[in-house]
Structure formats: structure tokens, C-alpha cells
Image (cartoon, rainbow, N blue to C red):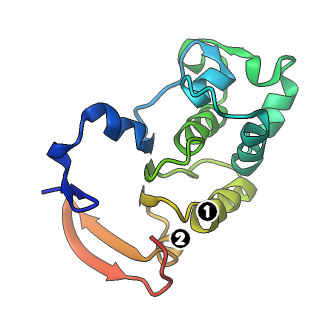
Amino acid sequence: NIFINDTPIANYELFSLRNAMGILTGGQDIFEGTIRNNICLGGNNITDEQLYALAQVVGLKPFVEECPRGFEHVLKPSGQHLPGRTIKKILLMRALIHKSPLLLLEEPWLGLEPEYENNIKEYLLQKMNHATIIIVTNDIAFAKQCNKTVTLNAGTVTNITEGSNGRN
């Protein structure tokens, strides 16, 4: 059984669950529309300051600054003509921008430049204290900084380690 705040997941409406999650998985893609729309998904309460601050963290700011219309630059379907790193940064911003109470992230820094990898790790560990974060990663050093590590082998839980840092 899966529980959220001691309530069975089946008791929640799917729409409310989706609105409470930030998700980054390998199966996601960007769509034809502005950079802002791809990140905010219609959330009108996100300011330019919030976008630029998070873009600095994930390393998207240089790309946005190169675009004549900034966050209003229109992207082609499926990110055509964009480097994979840029697509990943947009998708990561999509998962983080709403400061959702639950984040599900699959290798959020894999393939990104080392400086941004470090920024993202610090951001998740220091700035996302309001959220429960589940990260799928092979980064042992990062996992040691988390309050709980679940090790899987061929889809089976082989070890659960409690951390001593008090983070969720």
C-alpha cells in the first residue's frame, strides 16, 4: 500500500496528486511552445525572477540569455535542434519550479556540466526542505547525504539505510 500523509493513495483524486508532484523521468519531452510554457505548464504565478533564479541553478540561464525573446522563445516540437543538455535543464526546471511537496526525479544531474550538477545537488539538499524528494540515482556520494537510502537490485529492495542528517 502507498500512503501520503497517512492517507491511502486511492483516496486522492488523480488531478490533485499530479498538481502536488514535480516529476523528471527519461520519458518526458518538451512541446512546441515558449520556454516559459514548457517550464511553467500554464502556471501563471511564476515570476521572471523565479525563472531566472532557477535557470541559474540548473544552468539554463546562458541559453535563455542567447535567445532574443528570452523565456518567450518558441521551441520546436520534441526539442528539435536543441542539445540534450538544454532539454534536460528545461525538464528539470519544470519539475522544480512549482515547489511541489513531492518530487520524483530520475538522475536529475546526469549528463550536465559539473558546476550545475553541484548546484542542483545543493539546491535539492538545502532549498527544498518543504518537499519529500525521491531521487533515482547511482550517485553513492549524494545518496549518503540523504536521510534514507533504498538500494534496489533487479527491482528488489536489498538494503534500506537511515541517514543521520535529518533531511527528507
Q: Where is residue 163, by image quadrant?
A: bottom left
Q: Quick one: SS at disc 2?
A: helix
Q: Amino acid at mark 2?
A: Phe
Q: What is the number of callouts on the image? A: 2
Q: Where is residue 126, by image quadrant?
A: bottom right
Q: Check contact, mark 1 vs mark 2: CB within 8 A.
A: yes
Assign the N terminus to one quadrant of the image.
Answer: bottom left
Residue 40 shown left or right of residue 113 in the figure: left
Q: What x and y, as percent, mark residue 106?
A: 44, 49
Residue 118 shown left or right of residue 153 in the figure: right
Q: Which residue is mark 1?
A: 121
Please say whether residue 27 is visible from this viewpoint.
yes
Q: What x and y, as percent, mark residue 10?
A: 15, 44
Q: Which residue is mark 2?
A: 142
Q: Where is residue 18, by image quadrant?
A: top left
Q: Earlier in the sequence, mark 1 or mark 2?
A: 1
Could you classify mark 2 by the number of other residues whose Cα lies within 10 Å: few (under 14), some (14-19), or many (20 or more)? some
The numbered mark at residue 63 is none
Residue 33 shown left or right of residue 165 in the figure: right
Please say whether residue 136 is visible from this viewpoint.
no
Label 1, label 2: how far apart the Cα atoms are: 8 Å
Q: Is residue 67 above or below residue 118?
A: above
Q: Is residue 99 above or below residue 61?
A: below
Q: What x and y, as percent, mark residue 72?
A: 75, 18
Q: Is residue 136 above or below residue 67?
A: below
Could you classify mark 1 by the number of other residues whose Cα lies within 10 Å: few (under 14), some (14-19), or many (20 or more)? some
Assign the C terminus to one quadrant of the image.
Answer: bottom left
Q: 15 or 41: which is nearer to us?
A: 15
Q: Residue most toward the bottom?
A: 164
Residue drawn at x 33%, y 37% is 16
Q: 165 or 114: which is nearer to us?
A: 165
